[in-house]
Amino acid sequence: MAKAKQSSLSPQDIDHLRAELAAGRPPAVWFTSAAVGVEAGRSAKVVAFSEPAEGDFIQVRPTGEKDDLSFSPAELTVEKPAPRKRTPAPAPAAAPVAPAPVEHIYTPGPAPAPPKPKPAPAPATSAPASGERRPAARKQAKPAEVTVTLSSTAEGEWTVDVQWGSKRTLRAAPVAASAVSQAAKLLPAEVDEAVESVLSAARERHLARVEQLRAELEAAQRALAELTG
């Protein structure tokens, strides 16, 4: 029986598709046998109409793809194709008939030969004489001691020295006063008190210096105002 040919889009179908798309409902269409490069009967969604409405002006997105393609009304239809009939699975082949069992007549064979005696094991090697000395185990090397020294100046600047064993790996490296203050708070109270006393004295000196500079700046500004007045 010949397969019924699907009708292409009519002007009424196109108007209906435009209305559905304008309402925010992308309508479904199917490809006819005239569609080029697409399997007939495959579904798609209408996403736009190009202007003027000539040629391939209907833009659709085939099901399962992300790209939009352009087709003419002759290549599309609103008629959903009938589902394909499934071909019945072939009937299972008949099971082969098992052959009749063959009767075997038992005939005793010759008696097995007696086993050969196993050879005696070789004598074990003698242990090493007690006079032989084993090498003494090596002693593990003692880890080198590490000494970290923090030093401060009268201006409140801090430096750190690191002595690793007999080698000085770091010498008078500058350290921020805030970092020293934070580290001292994690150490015993005596360390924190000593560091805080140095930091307090440095803050007082810098504050006095700031006040002195502020007074000098104000005096300079007054002198400048008198000269320009």
Image (cartoon, rainbow, N blue to C red):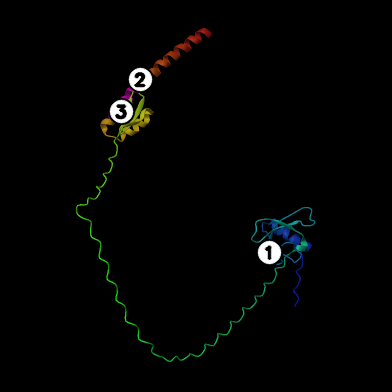
Q: Verify CB contact (< 8 Å) between mark 2 and mark 3.
A: no
- Residue, x 71% and y 57% (percent of image)? 69
Question: Label 3 sits on what residue type?
Answer: Val
Nearest the eye: 77 or 111 = 111
How far is disc 2 from disc 3 in space, using C-alphas?
Answer: 16 Å
Does the segment drawn in magenta span residue 200?
A: yes
Q: Is residue 150 above or below residue 126?
A: above
Could you tell me if residue 229 is visible in this image? Answer: no
> Counting other residues with Cα less than 10 Å from the Cα at mark 3, is it few (<14), some (14-19), or many (20 or more)?
many
Residue that mark 3 sits on: 195
Q: Nearer the viewer, mark 2 or mark 3?
A: 3
| Earlier-in-chain disc, 2 versus 3 | 3
Left or right of 18: which side holds 94? Answer: left
- Residue, x 42% and y 16% (percent of image)? 213
Res. 167 image quadrant? top left
Image: magenta residue range: 192-205
Question: Label 1 sits on what residue type?
Answer: Ser
How far is disc 1 from disc 3 in space, using C-alphas?
Answer: 81 Å
Which residue is most to the left? 130
Q: At numbered mark 1, what does the secondary structure look like: helix, strand or loop?
A: strand
Counting from the top left corner in percent of width and height, residue 101 is at: 48, 90
Q: Give residue 43's mark.
A: 1
Nearest the eye: 164 or 41 = 164
Left or right of 219: which side holds 88? Answer: right
Could you tell me if residue 179 is visible in this image? Answer: yes
Q: At numbered mark 3, what does the secondary structure look like: helix, strand or loop?
A: helix
Counting from the top left corner in percent of width and height, residue 174 is at: 38, 27
Q: Give residue 205's mark.
A: 2
